[in-house]
Every structure is written in structure tokens, then in C-alpha cells.
Amino acid sequence: MRQTAIQHNIEDCNIINAPLFKHLTGEEADRVNAEKSPGFYKKGTYIYHEGNRINGCYIVFKGILKIYKTGIDGKEQIIRFAKPYEIIGFRSVLSGELACTTAKVMEDSTLCYLPQDSLYYLVKNNGAFSLELMQLICRELGEANEYITDIAQKTVRERLAEILIHLKENFGLDNENVLQISLTREELANIVGTATESVIRLLSEFKSDHYIDIDGRKIKILNFTALQKLANL
Amino acid sequence: MRQTAIQHNIEDCNIINAPLFKHLTGEEADRVNAEKSPGFYKKGTYIYHEGNRINGCYIVFKGILKIYKTGIDGKEQIIRFAKPYEIIGFRSVLSGELACTTAKVMEDSTLCYLPQDSLYYLVKNNGAFSLELMQLICRELGEANEYITDIAQKTVRERLAEILIHLKENFGLDNENVLQISLTREELANIVGTATESVIRLLSEFKSDHYIDIDGRKIKILNFTALQKLANL
DNA sequence: CGAACCCTTGAGATCCTTCAATCCATGTGG
DNA sequence: CCACATGGATTGAAGGATCTCAAGGGTTCG
């Protein structure tokens, strides 16, 4: 069973499936595919820790990871999630700095490790890839700037509504309008930047306003427009 | 006088003086220098506005600019400052998105406009430059992530202390330990992400604790270590 | 001199956090 | 199978940090 899963995953791990690598020549793709190492990681596993030196990055083929920083008193601040065909760890590899975040598996994942030399090789020799990667980083930087403004200026209520919208857009809803990502109240709080209790109180406020419905960790979106209005978007 | 200043600035505007361009070949440098257009901008001038499409970026050769986003009710959130040999506007050019910030001149500036084609040309054809630029963006992204965590978790007092430290590190002190950048209370508030009145109260608290001394917009650092401790760094 | 802009201070309101207690589901060892 | 530990979710109460509103003072500049 486990064996089958791995086999299956390794076959799927062709780098060319990730949009970032679409400009690779056949030769480059072969080279990179040969240099990468696929792996299966169970929920709860750490891929790298804040402060580590990392010598390569990872491409996600299956699963979800959370990328977070550890702040005051060990409180985590979730920076983003990574889902299939996204790449993690590239920031530290490219900047040559220590990892500024920790990456932890939230749902069993298949990742491919890509050594830094492979990444450097591509950046130096394939201008189109280089540009594609740069665009990715630039978009991320734009989102970070956006979030700085939000945290600095919006209330916790507005930010929570906004996060629910982001989660919907990034992970989608199932056929019953339930968010396709399962987070604890504490994790929600660690995205929004607030206390767990505040998230709980606001979620039940949203519920009594009929914007959402709650069943444990399942959050059903009932009134998307109202949430958008609430989020000041 | 004005004429002399411009002459002087144009001479100084050799792209090669900016560290980012250190890997350019002589030929590339000549090409880029020919394609760029230098300009003198007075305090208060806008270089580009949030939401604009911009077709090139600017290299700062003299002066200081503030880069900010406009949030709720028009309140500005300062994202960063740009000083000589730094580059602004590249994020939107590279990502192909609209400008996500506004750039405004705080001290009379000399900038060189670099059309996007020049930038693309370098990215595609000079791997070393590409990597250098990527490192720059990655460092910026790291700082943004850091700031998200700070805003989300630290108190206003801690953040104000931290900003004073950052300003000292980025702009330095004069021979009397006075910060070499002049900001209004409101601007300080718009970096920290708080109300102007809060900045005023906290600055005078820092003053009565003898961490700083204040004379209008001049802020003298008296006890750097205490500020660091206060900032939780 | 007035207008515009910035700085300062006070008072009250409010949002949010913290602390403490309870509940519930799950899993584990005896 | 029960007792107990663990981790998450919930609720209440109290306090504190910060914001908003309002008023007044100082400077600069046309």
C-alpha cells in the first residue's frame, strides 16, 4: 500500500507538471528530473526550520504545507500555505540567507527536493525560466505588502472575513460550500494575527449573522458577498 | 545653479555605480546607460501611483523616496523608503501587474528611468544579473514576512522602538546621534501602523525614559540598547 | 495676518487580550 | 472497560492598550 503510493507519486513527480517550469527545454527538464529527489512526508513532519541553512528547495506535488514564522513567546504567524505545483524554500536558497520560516506538513504530502545547484543552473542559463521565477517572487512580494497594510489598518473582524475569502479562493469549496482546508481555531488566529478566543467569538458572530455555518472545523460559506463587504474588499 | 546640479547628476548617473548592476559587461552597461533617462524630481513629486501601469523602473541616485500603499479611508501605509542606488518600481514591471504602491519624493531626488525592455533584456541575457536581482527581491520578501509577524504580534510600543532602530540602521545618525531622516509624526505612525497620537505619546514616553531626545522632527538616540530591548529584538 | 500644517494633550469609548473554568472528543494504559 | 491525560473549542469576566474625537498651541509661508 505504502509502496504503491510512493511508486505512483514518483511517476507523477515530473517537474514539467509545475507551471513554473514550463519554459524548460526537454534537455533541461531531463536534467532537473534526474537531479531532484522525490519523497513522501506524513502530516506533522517538518520540512525545514526557521534559522536552518537549506541547500535546496521543494516542489509540492501532493498535500498541503503551512509556512510560518515563530514570533514572541513561540506564537506562530502563518505566512502562507503551499499546495500542489507550488515551490517552497526558494527564497532562502536564492537570497543565500538562513530560512526565515518553518515549513510543516498539514496533509500527507509528496514533495521533490531540488538541490540549489539545479536552481542556480536554470536561473543562469534559461532567461525565460528566470523571468517566470522572478514574476512568482514579485507576486508574492505584492501579496506580502498587501497583507502588511491589512494587518496594520483593518480590524480583526475585517481580517478574519478576508482570510475566509482567501481560503475559499485558494482551496475552493466542496459541493456543500464547505472550505476545502481544515484548520484549527488557533491556526486561523495565527493567520489573522489575533488570539484564538477572538477567532472563536467572531466565527460564532459570523454564524449568527448567517454569513457562515460551522460544524467543528468545517466552515460553510453561506453569504460570500456579505463576507466581502465585511472584509472591506 | 539648477543647471549645474542637473549636469552634475547626469554625470553621476552611471548605472554601474549601483551594486545591482555590478555584473554587467561593459557592452551591457553602455547599452543600458544609453537607454536610461535621468531626471531631477523635487520634494513632493509623485513618481508613480498605486494602480498605474508602469513601463519601467527607476534607479535612485540622490534623495529619498517613500513607497506606500493607500488603505482604508486613504490612510497611507509606508512599505519602505528608497535611497541612493536602490531601485523602485521593478516589482510591477517584472510581475506585469499594476503598481501596488505609490512612490513619492521626500527629499529632492535624482532618478534614472529604465524602460522595462532594458530590464527584461538583462534578465534574459545575463544570468549573474538575474540572480543578483532575484536575491534583492528575496531579501525584500524576507523583510516583508518579518514585518507581517511584527505587526501581528508586537505592541505599538515595541514596533515604534523597532522602527527607530531600523531608521538608524538604514539612514544612520549624524555626529550628535540624531536620526538622518526627517519624518512627521504622521509618517512614523504610517510605518508603525498606528494613530499619530499614539506615536506622539510613545515618543514622549521614550523621552522621559531617556531612551531618546526630541527636538521637533529631530530624534536623538540616547540609549540604543534600551530601544533594542524594548523592541524585543 | 490668516491659512495650512503639524504637534500635543485630555477624556471617553471600544476593541481585543488575558485568565480561568468548563466541556467535549480522542486516545492510551492499566 | 474504565480512568485519566491530552488537545481543541467555548464562554465569561475583567483589564488594558489603543483609537477617536475634540480642543488648543506653535510654525511657516504667502
Image (cartoon, coloured by chain):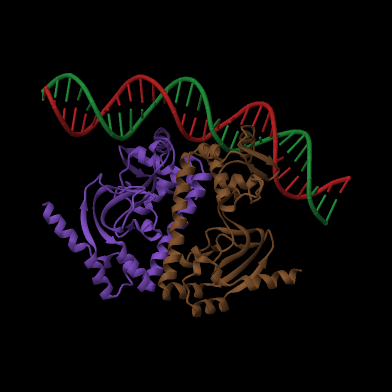
Chain colours: A purple, B brown, C red, D green
Q: How many badges with numbers are in the image?
A: 0
Q: Quadrant of residue B48?
A: bottom right
User: Looking at the image, which residue is at 43% across and 57% down?
Assistant: A140
Nearer the observer, B112 or B78:
B112
Q: Residue A105, position in %: x, y? A: 27, 48
Which percent across, then down, holds residue B70? Answer: 57, 53
**Residue at position x 71%, y 69% in the image:** B5
Q: Residue A218 at x, y = what percent?
A: 31, 41
| Camera-nearest residue between A137 and B146 | B146
Q: Against A6, is B8 above or below?
A: below
Above or below, B147 relative to B22? above
Taking the view exactly as shown, the residue that stands out farthest to the front is: B175
> In which image quadrant can residue B62 be found?
bottom right
D4 or A182, which lies in front?
A: D4
Q: Is residue A138 visible in the rendered structure shown here? A: no
Q: Is residue B179 visible?
A: yes
Give the percent coordinates (x, y) of residue B108. Answer: 68, 61
Left or right: residue B177 versus residue D12 is: right
User: In the rendered view, does B68 fall on the left or right side of D22?
Assistant: left
Query: Which residue is found at the position 46% from the left and 61% from the top?
Result: B136
Locate the N terminus of chain B by quadrant: bottom right
* Apparent side of residue B135 relative to residue A103 in the rendered image (left or right): right
